[in-house]
Amino acid sequence: MKTRPSPRAGSYEINRRRFLRGLGAGIALPTLPPWSGSSLGAATSEPALHRATTASGAPLRFGVVYFPNGAIPKTWWPTTEGAPFELTPTLQPLASVRSQLQVLGGLDHVNATAGPDGAGDHARASGTFLTGVRVKKTAGSDIRAGVSIDQLIAQRIGQQTRFPSLELSCDAVRKSGNCDSGYSCAYQYNLSWRSHNTPVAPEPNPRLLFERLFGAGKHGERAESLIRRQRQQRSILDFVLDDARSLQRELPAQDRHKLEEYLSSVRDIEQRIQRAEQFGPTPDPDAASPEGVPTSFEAYVQLMFDMLFLAFQTDSTRVGTFLLANEGSNRAFPEIGIAEGHHHLTHHLNKQDMIDKVSEIDRFYVRQFARFLEKMNQTQDIDGKSLLHNSMILYGSGNSDGNRHTHTNLPLLLAGSGGGALKAGRFQRYGGVPMSNLLLSLSDQMGAHGIERLGDSTGRLSAV
């Protein structure tokens, strides 16, 4: 049993600094899946179990892939509705999986429009994308969005897998600072929100993500490595929680709030370890552990897509989000001969050379997505169908036309057949309804029933 001296007058500040500094050093928490509790020692309230399976009993998977800065409308949208749809220049890389795709037009996020809030369309675009709410304009700690649809689904079906959800990114991890005209960076660098003021930070490092999923080391050695890591985590958790209990009563209100928010993630580690033990031996795919972040952005994106593929293939999770780059990203693309920044080019003022370069960037992102879908489509699931057939992967941006910062008629693709429940292989216009309606319909398909509303939703989207 651990013993420590009783608190003394004047020792509070030292203990406080030591403890808060130790929180970050002891456990890497930014990439953890969500936990629904909010206070130290509180028991979680598990929702009733829902089934995220297809009619054949195979796992049903839900993914979201976000690309920044909208798309050039002329090279994105097919000209006629129905099936089969036209493969426009931007969508051409998807030719081999066209029968598993829907191009969805006429879906809006009006809560991302300026209104009385003025500038800040990039922050609103990504902050609203999976929440449907108007995010609060603040660069301080009083951020406010809403619970995102992926986390609502994970709360209901996440007990069926080792990880309720996974969050990935090929960008920085930021939860604070001023990034867009008075909006917090939290809105642009996080797609997933477990509560109105708590984003779920994505994991940008493929090696750390792989080790979190399967353990460190070579194929055949990872199970033992993961067990050692879990034992070490338990020891750290015991120490952190013991320290927290001794300090919680002494902390001022602001620090108590931070502590409780942090400890919700600590509690989640406990649940993750318990869940891993519940599911038995951890999968050990015959794949090399990534060395780290590749120097090439194209290789980086492909590697992170491979991590999402492995997570779905091994049924480690059935819910995943992937932020390709933050909304407003000004990345250059030397891989395709573009030296200017993406965001700069989107403000093209109708100059054709700039429009052409943005179209090439749009196509670059679609090409990476197509590679992922092809891999999903070529991999057999437990029912003999493909992983893609038994999935619903939403690809899109919260900006429509990056030049004008519009948020109506969002560029959206829905890949996969949802186990046969979706009408794939077509272009469908919906005539200006909330995108939130689509997200609710997909949550129903995932078996995550009981989500009555999301943001500005007005109902379900029929005939998806």
Image (cartoon, grey):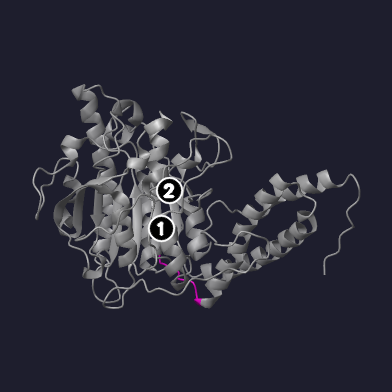
Q: Position of residue 263 (x, y in %)?
A: 65, 57
Q: In the drawing, does residue 253 fall left or right of residue 424?
A: right
Q: Quadrant of residue 274?
A: bottom right
| Mark 2: secondary structure | loop
Tell me whether circle 1 and circle 2 mark residues in contact (CB < 8 Å).
yes
Name the residue tied to disc 1.
150
Q: Residue at x 40, y 54 (%)?
A: 321
Q: Which segment is the magenta one?
A: 279-287
In screen coordinates, is 306 left or right of 81? right
Which residue was labeled with disc 2?
191
Residue 286 covered by magenta stretch? yes
413 relative to 156 in the view: left or right? left
Q: Quadrant of the N terminus?
A: bottom right
Which residue is at 20% across, 29% downward? 356
Q: Main secondary structure of the magenta part?
A: loop
Specify whether residue 365 is in view. Answer: yes
The location of residue 333, given as percent across then percent down, is 33, 33
Amino acid type, residue under disc 2 in the picture: Leu
Between the residue at mark 1 and the residue at mark 2, the CA separation in whole angstroms equals 9 Å
Image coordinates of residue 174 in percent, x first then y, are 52, 41
The residue that appears at 17% across and 37% down in the rendered structure is 75
Q: Looking at numbered disc 1 in the image, what kind of residue is underneath it?
A: Asp
